[in-house]
Amino acid sequence: MNQETLSEIRRELHQIPELGFREYKTQQYLLDYINKLPQKALTIETWRTGIFVRVKGKVGKKTIGYRADIDGLPLTEETGYEFQSTHDGRMHACGHDFHMTIALGALTRLAEDPADDDIIFLFQPAEEGPGGAEPMLQSEAMERYRPDVIFGLHVAPDLPVGSVSSKPGLLFANTSELFIDFKGVGGHAAFPHLTHDMVVTASSFVSHLQQIVARRVDPLDSAVITIGKIEAGTVQNIIAQAARLEGTIRTLSPEAMQKVKGEIEKVARGFEIANDCGIHIDYGANYHQVFNDAEQVHRFEKLVKETEYQYKEANMAMTGEDFGYMVKEIPGFMFWLGVESKAGLHQSTLKPKEEALPVGVHIVEKTLREL
C-alpha cells in the first residue's frame, strides 16, 4: 500500500473524530474498509464501538496481537488542514488517525498474504477516557482471541520520520484523573464573615497540593499533580458557594500513586475543618503504567535494525496510556513512531508528517510476521 492511499485513509479518519465509546462513524468506516479485504483468513467481531480482527495464520502456533486506539479528543482543531475535523469541538490531536491507518495498512497486507502465526488486530475505543483497554481485556471476545504477545505504537512529534523508540521496563507513567468539588456558603461580597468562600479555599488547596509532591513523595521517585481547570462563582460581587478543581496525577510507581492519593485525602479532611466546607474527591479514569517486556523489546529492536529505519532508546515519560492494562497481563510493549511535528500531542495544531505512515506499516507488518 503506497503513501498516497495511506494518506487518503488517514485524512478521511481525521475528519470524523469521536469521543470514547461514541466512535460510531469511526467503527463503521473501519468495518467498511475491512469487509472489502480478502476474507478467507479473516474473522471479524465487534465489541461496543471497537473491533477484533483475527487473521488466521498459515501455521498458527501462537497469536500476536496489535492494538490501535480509535477515539479523538474534545478539542477544536486549528491546523488549517483542508481535511480538518468536521465534528465541532472534536479533533484527532493525539495521532489516533495515524494509529488506525497504520493498522489498516498492515492488516491489508496480512489479509492478502497471512503470516505463519495467527494475528489479532484490536481496534480499541476510549483510550483518551474513560478507558477502553481494561474492559476490552476483560471481554468475552478477548477470551476467544487472547494473544500470546501484544504490542502497539504511539506517534512521537519530537522524533524524525524514519525513526522509532522504545525501552525495556517502565515507558509510561501511572495516571489518574482528579476532580475535587468544594461546597461552602455563598453570599454578598460586602459580608464575607457570613460566608465560607470557596474561591479562597480552592485556591489555597491548589497550593497545598504542590507540597505533597515536594514533601511527601520520595525524591528518588517521581510524581506530578497538575490542576488544569478551576471553576467557581457566578458574578464579581457574590462570594462563591462552590468550586471545582480538575486535574491529573502522574507517578512512576503504583505505590507513589497510592501515596499521593492518600495525602490529597488528608489535606481535604483538614481543609473541611479549617474552612467549614465539604470536599468531595473523584479520581475518574485511572491508567496503569506501561511496563514493556524486556525480551519482546529486544526482539523488536533487532527487527527494526534489520530495516533502513533508526532505533533509539527511549526515556521514561509521564504520559498516560491505558495500553498499560494490556501489557500488565500479556507480555508486550509499546513504541514511539517519529512523525516530526512542531506542535505536540493534545495540541490543536498537531500536524504529524504523513511520510511516517508507510514507515509505521512496514515496521508493524514486519513485527507481526517475525516477533
Image (cartoon, helix red, strand yellow):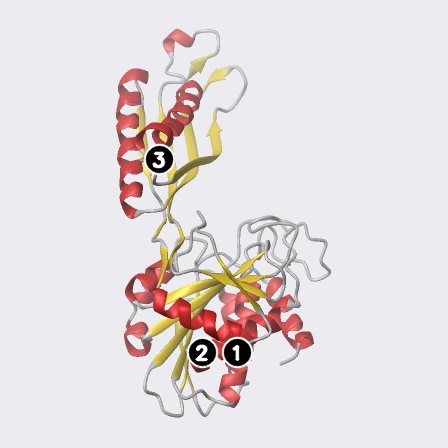
In the image, what residue type sits under mark 3? Pro
Mark 2 to mark 1 CA distance (whole Å)? 9 Å
Residue under numbered circle 3: 219
Q: Quadrant of the C terminus?
A: bottom left
Total of numbered circles in the picture?
3
Q: Within 10 Å of the Cα at label 1, are there few (<14), some (14-19), or many (20+) other Cα atoms?
A: many
Percent across and percent down for residue 175 are 38, 47
Q: Is residue 39 left or right of residue 12?
A: left
Percent across and percent down for residue 231 are 48, 30
Residue 29 makes an appearance in the image: no
Query: Which residue is at a point 44% across and 21% down the rendered structure image?
Result: 199
Q: Within 10 Å of the Cα at label 2, are there few (<14), some (14-19), or many (20+) other Cα atoms?
A: many
Mark 1 or mark 3: which comes first in sequence?
A: 1
Mark 1 to mark 3 CA distance (whole Å)? 43 Å
Mark 3 or mark 2: which comes first in sequence?
A: 3
Q: Within 10 Å of the Cα at label 3, are there few (<14), some (14-19), or many (20+) other Cα atoms?
A: few
Residue under numbered circle 2: 368
Q: Is residue 356 left or right of residue 264?
A: right
In the image, what residue type sits under mark 1? Ala
Residue under numbered circle 1: 106
Q: Quadrant of the N terminus?
A: bottom right
The relative height of residue 348 versus residue 273 in the rendered view (above or below) is: below
Q: Secondary structure at mark 1?
A: helix
The answer to whether the residues at label 2 and label 1 have Cβ atoms under 8 Å apart is yes
Mark identifier at residue 371 = none
In the image, what residue type sits under mark 2? Leu
Q: Secondary structure at mark 2?
A: helix
Q: Secondary structure at mark 3?
A: loop
Percent across and percent down for residue 31 are 50, 77
